[in-house]
Image (cartoon, rainbow, N blue to C red):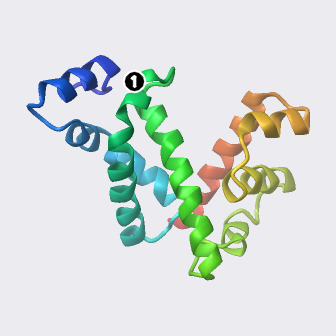
Amino acid sequence: MEKTITKDILKNELYAGQRPAVELLYTRYSGMLFSYILQFVPGRAEASTLLVDIFSRLTPQLQTAFDSSLSVYCWLQVEARKIILEYIGKEERRGAGRTNKAYYSSLLEDTSPEHQWVFRELFIYGRKKEELAAQSGKDLAYISGILRECLLVIRKNLE
């Protein structure tokens, strides 16, 4: 199988009906998306449940993926982020487990205040990178770089 599923491949699979498009997406991208989810929902069972929820919620929206300027995986990741934020918000309202601000702060305690701020604004409060870049006077690439560094630190601290 090809490394990347293009929109044309996905459309052809969807319209041919030989193999459900969600199966194609899941086969190719579930591993990468699962790793992404684990950066925010550290329990594997909890992350697995969320992965299934993400695919079941995004499958009916595939036309949006086709219309998007993003690649299929980037679209999945952007949409998954929204679902993850929604999930984290629900968990915080319930006062549940390790998805609260203190937990994430502990994972990033060895980073700079700027790193902690960028992560908190983007993933705890759900702000957009562009909005944060404009507010901070930094460019989008800088904010994206800080976020990548935060995710690497979180991954390291979860191991």
Residue occupied by mark 1 = 66
* Amino acid type, label 1: Phe
Foreground pick, 2 / 155: 2
Foreground pick, 145 / 16: 16
Q: Residues within 10 Å of mark 1 (few under 14, many from 20)?
A: some
Where residue 2 sits, quadrant-wise, is: top left
Residue drawn at 79 percent across, 37 percent down: 131
Please, is residue 37 above or below residue 21 in the view? below
Where residue 157 sits, quadrant-wise, is: bottom right
Residue drawn at 77 percent across, 49 percent down: 118
Residue 51: x percent and y percent? 37, 56
Please, is residue 8 above or below residue 134 in the view? above
Residue drawn at 39 percent across, 68 percent down: 44
Q: In this view, does 68 lie to the left or right of 141?
A: left
Please, is residue 44 above or below residue 141 in the view? below
Q: What element carries label 1?
A: helix
